[in-house]
């Protein structure tokens, strides 16, 4: 086993902060949830109860190695030179590898035009080329991230060209057409216009999009076009089901994140003293929970909040007070912090759950310090609040009591990520941008769906293919990945399933996600150990214990090093 830790050490930029370019303004879709607006509901798609692990050939889907093993026939099939028959996965150096499928015979009948954008020879894909918001672009570039649209687009093209040679495409090539954005990521009018460009192209699928408005993916879903990889942010469960089988978001949906939060709080904190508060008077009290929550429009998303409180009540927990604000700009915190903190104090809250944008905690913690109020700060389902980069901007004495659930994996050097390693493995060179970790999921997920769908490629078989993906166990530095009903008991179109525990160490010195040396680092408990729903322990998790925790991996844990397969014949790295 080997990893790529020696390559490109000069470029020490970390993946998580690159997400700013696509989620800073839309982050509250997971932090505050997504409300149901009947005017915005997608009409296409009916959903399905197909579960993982299909019949292979009996269903018209390709037989996977794992299915052949279950049938005892894996030894009767020549899986080809690129299948690792010890694992049943393709010889590609990534976690969550592609399952081997029975090889397609060249020249066999693949059904021809099985769906819009699919012919006997090619699959048409619309690749969205973004136009970054100037403020967000400046923020990310100041942080060291490369957001040049041309370089980002080229990286995505490179991934698709590589994946076309790796996965089984059943005699078809990828016909990739770049769609130039006509506006920023939050411009709904431009997004709708860009969606029409895609619809006019009549592709099978689109990769990427202006994720900070639903206008783009809603139009595509209504037109029956599969959309993956940055088309949307974290939409609630019922919204994604309403768009099935066309919308494939990355990460957990808000309801799944809430499930993790309720279980973590219920098994670890409910009914126990607020031992991590800064005020001795609070430390001796049984925890009283309050929630400060961002949203994208007026209203409190009552359906999602009610569902959380129902789950929380099963553990004996309740929310004493909930303060919800409308996130508009990065200056929102100055307006909401005094009222929000006073509300928490008046309700006797010892432990504040944060589901906010990454800017507001600065004003919240400063206001709490001003009022002499020192509660526990619990990081809930949000994005970027759980980073060292933003953590250093918060009032440090207050933030020294911050802990909670982490949806991203434990940090690792950028060049240790699958997205970096696989690019270098195939091309023999570093990726054109250091934000490749944001780009990779779209091409990867699209290629995986095609690979598992078989020759009869349609949106429905694309879904059935992903729903039968045989998951590999998650790790410390990569998530457990699955689709279907096996994990959640409900049709799941999102990719990740697990979460970890984090806390902020004000004394630790190290590099932020942007490579800046300084004091204050986010720590991942037990090396970033991750839990699936239903698996959170009741025994105390060692929060605020340095022993066994990690701030950033500069080498992958030995158990998580990917197999250093030689480059495939025909790849640029192999001289092809």
Image: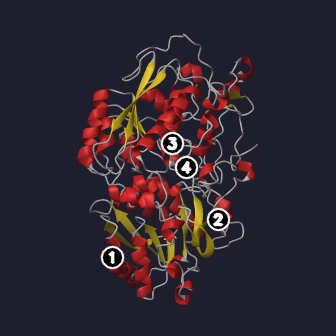
- Residue at 24%, 39% in the rendered image: 193
Asked if the residue under mark 4 is in contact with the one under mark 1, i.e. CB atoms within 8 Å, the reply is: no
Left or right for 5, reference 401: right
Residue 230 % position (x, y): 42, 45
- Residue at 72%, 39% in the rendered image: 564
In the rendered view, would you say 401 is above or below 191?
below
Left or right for 368, reference 480: left
Asked if the residue under mark 3 is in contact with the one under mark 2, i.e. CB atoms within 8 Å, the reply is: no
Q: Is residue 50 shown to the viewer in this render? A: no
Cα distance between the residues tagged 2 and 3: 26 Å
Which residue carries the number 4 mark? 497
Of labels 1 and 3, earlier in sequence is 1
What colour scheme governs how the chains and residues are painted in the rendered image of this protein? secondary structure
Cα distance between the residues tagged 1 and 4: 35 Å
The label nearer to you, 1 versus 4, is 1
Q: Which mark is residue 334?
A: 1
Residue 247 % position (x, y): 40, 39
Left or right for 194, reference 434: left
Neighbourhood count class around disc 4 (C-alpha, 10 Å): few under 14, some 14–19, many 20 upward: many
Q: Which mark is residue 525?
A: 2
């Amino acid at each position: 086993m080997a990893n790529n830790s020696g390559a490109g050490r000069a470029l020490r930029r970390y993946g998580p902060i690159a997400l700013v370019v696509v989620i800073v303004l839309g982050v509250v879709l997971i932090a505050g949830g997504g409300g149901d607006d009947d005017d915005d509901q997608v009409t296409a798609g009916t959903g399905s109860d197909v579960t993982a692990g299909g019949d292979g050939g009996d269903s018209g889907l390709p037989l996977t190695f794992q299915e052949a093993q279950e049938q005892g026939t894996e030894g009767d099939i020549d899986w080809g030179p690129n299948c690792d028959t010890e694992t049943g996965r393709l010889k590609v150096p990534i976690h969550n590898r592609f399952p081997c499928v029975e090889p397609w015979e060249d020249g066999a009948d693949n059904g021809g035009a099985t769906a819009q954008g699919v012919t006997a020879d090619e699959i048409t894909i619309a690749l969205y080329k973004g136009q970054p918001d100037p403020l967000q672009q400046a923020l990310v570039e100041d942080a060291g991230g490369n957001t040049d649209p041309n370089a980002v687009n080229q990286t995505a093209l490179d991934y698709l060209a590589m994946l076309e040679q790796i996965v089984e495409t059943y005699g078809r090539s990828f016909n990739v057409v770049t769609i130039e954005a006509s506006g920023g990521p939050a411009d709904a009018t431009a997004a709708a216009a860009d969606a029409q460009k895609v619809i006019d192209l009549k592709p099978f699928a689109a990769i990427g999009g202006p994720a900070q408005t639903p206008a783009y993916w809603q139009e595509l879903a209504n037109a029956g076009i599969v959309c993956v990889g940055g088309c949307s942010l974290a939409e609630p469960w019922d919204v994604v089901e309403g768009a099935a089988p066309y919308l494939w978001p990355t990460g957990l949906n808000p309801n799944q994140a809430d499930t993790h939060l309720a279980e973590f709080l219920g098994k670890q904190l409910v009914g126990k003293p607020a031992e991590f508060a800064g005020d001795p008077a609070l430390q001796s009290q049984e925890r009283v929970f309050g929630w400060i929550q961002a949203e994208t429009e007026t209203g409190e998303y009552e359906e999602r909040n009610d569902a959380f409180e129902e789950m929380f009540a099963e553990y004996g927990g309740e929310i004493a007070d909930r303060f919800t604000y409308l996130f508009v700009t990065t200056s929102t915190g100055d307006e909401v912090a005094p009222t929000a903190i006073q509300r928490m104090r008046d309700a006797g809250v010892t432990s504040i759950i944060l589901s906010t944008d990454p800017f507001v905690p600065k004003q919240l913690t400063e206001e709490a310090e001003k009022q002499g109020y020192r509660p526990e700060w619990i990081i809930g389902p949000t994005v970027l609040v759980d980073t060292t980069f933003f953590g250093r901007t918060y009032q440090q004495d207050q933030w020294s009591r911050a802990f909670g659930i982490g949806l991203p994996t434990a940090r690792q050097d950028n060049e240790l990520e699958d997205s970096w390693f696989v690019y270098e493995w195939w091309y023999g060179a570093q990726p054109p941008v250091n934000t490749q970790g944001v780009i990779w999921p779209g091409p990867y997920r699209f290629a995986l769906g095609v690979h598992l769908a078989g020759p009869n490629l349609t949106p429905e078989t694309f879904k059935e293919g992903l729903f039968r993906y045989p998951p590999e166990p998650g790790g410390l530095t990569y998530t457990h990945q699955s689709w279907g009903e096996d994990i959640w008991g409900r049709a799941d179109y999102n990719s990740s399933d697990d979460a970890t525990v984090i806390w902020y160490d004000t004394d630790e010195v190290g590099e932020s996600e942007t490579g800046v040396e300084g004091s204050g680092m986010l720590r991942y408990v037990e090396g970033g150990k991750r839990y699936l729903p239903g698996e959170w322990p009741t025994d105390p998790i060692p929060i605020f214990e340095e022993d066994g925790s990690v701030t950033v991996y500069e080498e992958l844990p030995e158990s998580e090093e990917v197999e250093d397969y030689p480059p495939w014949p025909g790849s640029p790295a192999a001289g092809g």
